[in-house]
Amino acid sequence: MAGLALGRAPGLLAALLSATAAGTLFMEPGPLLVPAGGDQALVLALFLLVTITTALAFDALFGAFEDLERRAVLLREGEARFRALVESAPKKMWVNRPDGSGDIYNAAWRDFTGQGDDHQGRAWIEAIHPDDRTIVVSAREAGIRERRAYNVEVRLRAGDGRYRRHRAQVAPLLRDGAIESWVGIATDIEDLRSAVERLREGEERLRLATEHAEVGFWDVDLVQDRLIWPPRVKAMFGISAEAEVSMADFYAGLHPDDREATTAAFLRACDPEMRGLYDVEYRTVGKEDGVVRWVAAKGRGLFDEAGQCRRVVGIAIDISPRKADEQRLREYADELETLVDAVPAAIWIARDPEARRVDGNRVARDLLRVPSPANMSKTSPDARDAVRHFRILEPDGAEIPPRDLPVQRAARGVQVRDFEETVVFEDGGAVHLIGNAVPLLSSEGRPRGSIAAFVDITALKQAESGLQAANETLERRVDERTAELREANARLARETAERLRAEADLHQVQKMETIGQLTGGVAHDFNNLLTPIMGSLDIIRRRVTLDQRTDRLLGGAMEAAERAKTLVARLLAFARRQTLETRPVDMGQLVDGMRDLIARSLGPQIALAVGIPGALPPAKVDPSQIELAILNLCVNARDAMPEGGSLRISAREELVAEGSRTDLAPGDYVVLSVADTGTGMDATTLQRAVEPFFTTKPRGRGTGLGLSMVHGLAAQSSGALLLDSQPGQGTRAEVWLPAAQEAAAGRRSEDVEAIPAPFEAKVLLVDDEDLVRLGTAEMLRDLGYVVAEANGGAAALELLRGGLAPDLLVSDYLMPGMNGADLATAVRHLRPSLPVLLITGYAQLADGAADDLPRLTKPFRQSDLAHRVADLLSPEAHGMTPGSSRSPDLGAP
Ligand SMILES: Nc1ncnc2c1ncn2[C@@H]1O[C@H](COP(=O)(O)OP(=O)(O)OP(=O)(O)O)[C@@H](O)[C@H]1O
Ligand SMILES: [Mg+2]
């Protein structure tokens, strides 16, 4: 500024004034737009200060310039002052020349832009925002063109790089009509601009808000008793827009229920003492349409200096939709609450993410035994009292930590589905629950609580476990029953098998019995036939002298009759009807006596072994019959060993105990065993072997009566025959005989020769069968006896009563009417000393009264009869008292 001429001073002042005027002009809208406020006041004050200060400064300067004109000497001093003034001006100021020389930028400029002293020349253009430079350049060009001041709004860069808006006022300094320099002042209008913008935004927002909220402004002029209602407020009272309104409309439009309270509030707002805020919600009844609306109104009384309320102004909003919404919301909440209490499920609601407050519905409280509404949170210390009396367990029995309960987990944002838990109370009671818990989310999607709904499945669980128990019981029952049935079945099978065996045994026994009876009958008839045949043949042989051929024929007939007699004897043995002469028999002695005979019958190919202990008790059996039986068994063994082998005869003692499962009576037994190493028998053969006439031998070789006889003898002797055989394994036959208590009697030698009558004794012969009687009578007469005959008991007694005095009575046993035994009894009364001989064909005679009577078994030979009769007529026998107990054995041959 060193080169600035003093002559330019008035121009500079004019430029300053011009710039100041431009600022004033620019600032003019400020007070109009901006209500008295901090920023605006500051700006205004600043502006005034600057203007006044500047004006004062330039005034002084002006004086100085005048003085300079007058006093050139003072000019230099004045320039220095100007420079100092510019330098110290509070606004950013600069002076520059079109040629760019001697530019000045004051302290305010440098402070703001951070430019140094050295930063002269085009410093100003560098501080301008690049986007604003063209505006500045064109404004400057217009200023140059028209040689006038110009204003421009630019953004200037501060030292920190930020831009602030400024109003730049630039005025030319003219000299002789040409621009010598430009003087500029920049005013920071950033805050002002921002305030204006904020105000505009505020205004706009208010406008939008009132429009959108449908706010109506109202004004009650109490002094003039005038009511100003915009159409919007009129509509709130059901009044059309163009209608005139007064305070009466206000009072009349209030809903009767709200009139009192609303009026009171309005009076309070007008009352100078109270000056209350008028803040009410009331219903209106439409004046023209009768519609009930909800209105919210706010207002305030305006009072004059005297304290008199002159006006009440405020706003009113139609809140009918909001009220309707509120009502609906209330109803909805009511419904929800009712629903929550009505559902048969336990419902819990937590309203914070920690679920520190948990409310339960009625079902939840009932289930958990919480008597009244209370905080049911297990995680909240102050809720513990209400929930202390129960624990919540997992189905496996582990206690669930409070933090992990469904309500708590869901409150933290976890979806819990189909969760099963058991609530166990202090008294031991328990309930089983199943349900879901879902998170409640805030509008930002963050968990803010939870809702859990659970149902009681205790009954279901109990039913389930009951069912399971029932199933187990059922299964156990079925198992038990199955076992019982299996056992019963096995028992039944055993019993059936036993019964079948018993039946088979019975069947066999019955069969044998039947066969025995048949056989017995047939054998008896045969015997009756054989007796006269044999007797007659005997007599013929004795009496008649025969030629050789006839004698041979007769011998043949005798032999056949003998064979027939043997057969009949076997049959009778099987039928257990043979006459047995049972007595104690030493089996060792007996077998010893047969040894040669047996060995002869076996032949040389078969080795015989005999092993009978000496200490064996005697057996009770007929010795000659048991001999026959042994012989039969030996012959069977021989026939089973055609290639040879060995035969062992042994005996042992056995005790059959009481209750043992055999057909034998309990007691001591002698068991005679005949064992061979022969072919053995298959099951069928073994089964039938004992049957009479069952034989596997070729026709004519076997009669099939051998084992039948042995069986019959054993059975009749109160013993049994046991056969044990397997094909290829040989056969063992055992004859069980009761052991005798007394010692064995010696064997009598048999004399079979006929003995002639010792004296001419008289014999009374009784038989109903003529042929038999004749034969027997012939035999007796042949022996030299005198024979009287009777054909029955009655006839015999008749003879005796008629004076017949026989020496001996010989009677058949089996007769029609009176049998032999009865006759003997009857005779004893008439003739006590008369000996009696019974001729029998039946073993049955052994029973009963006739036991002690001497007897002769049919068929008999003459010699047999001779011995018997002679015995009975012998002096010793004769001397005995008839009827005394005399063993029949003593009378046996
Ligand atoms: N020791 C044995 N070994 C093999 N089979 C036997 C034996 N004993 C008997 N049997 C069988 O039993 C059947 C009946 O025997 P049983 O003695 O009753 O009559 P038999 O021997 O055939 O005729 P008989 O005795 O008149 O000669 C025999 O035919 C034979 O098949
Ligand atoms: Mg035989």
Image (cartoon, rainbow, N blue to C red):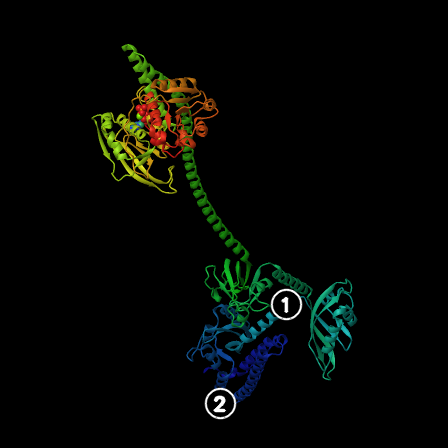
Q: Nearer the viewer, residue 393 or 441?
A: 393
Q: Residue furthest front?
A: 803
Q: Position of residue 34 (x, y in %)?
A: 61, 76
Amino acid on which the number 1 mark rests in the picture: Ala
| Disc 2: CA contacts within 10 A as few (<14), some (14-19) or many (>=20) | few
Q: Which residue is mark 2?
A: 73
Q: Nearer the viewer, residue 579 or 332?
A: 579
Which of marks 1 and 2 precedes in the sequence?
2
In the displayed structure, 564 sits above or below 1; it is above
Give the image quarter of residue 681: top left
| Disc 1: CA contacts within 10 A as few (<14), some (14-19) or many (>=20) | few
Measure how far apart labels 2 and 1 are at the Cα level: 70 Å
In the displayed structure, 473 sits above or below 885; it is below
Residue at x 45% of width, y 59% of height: 396
Give the image quarter of residue 873: top left
Amino acid on which the number 2 mark rests in the picture: Val
* Mark toward the viewer: 2 or 1: 1
Q: Which residue is mark 1?
A: 209
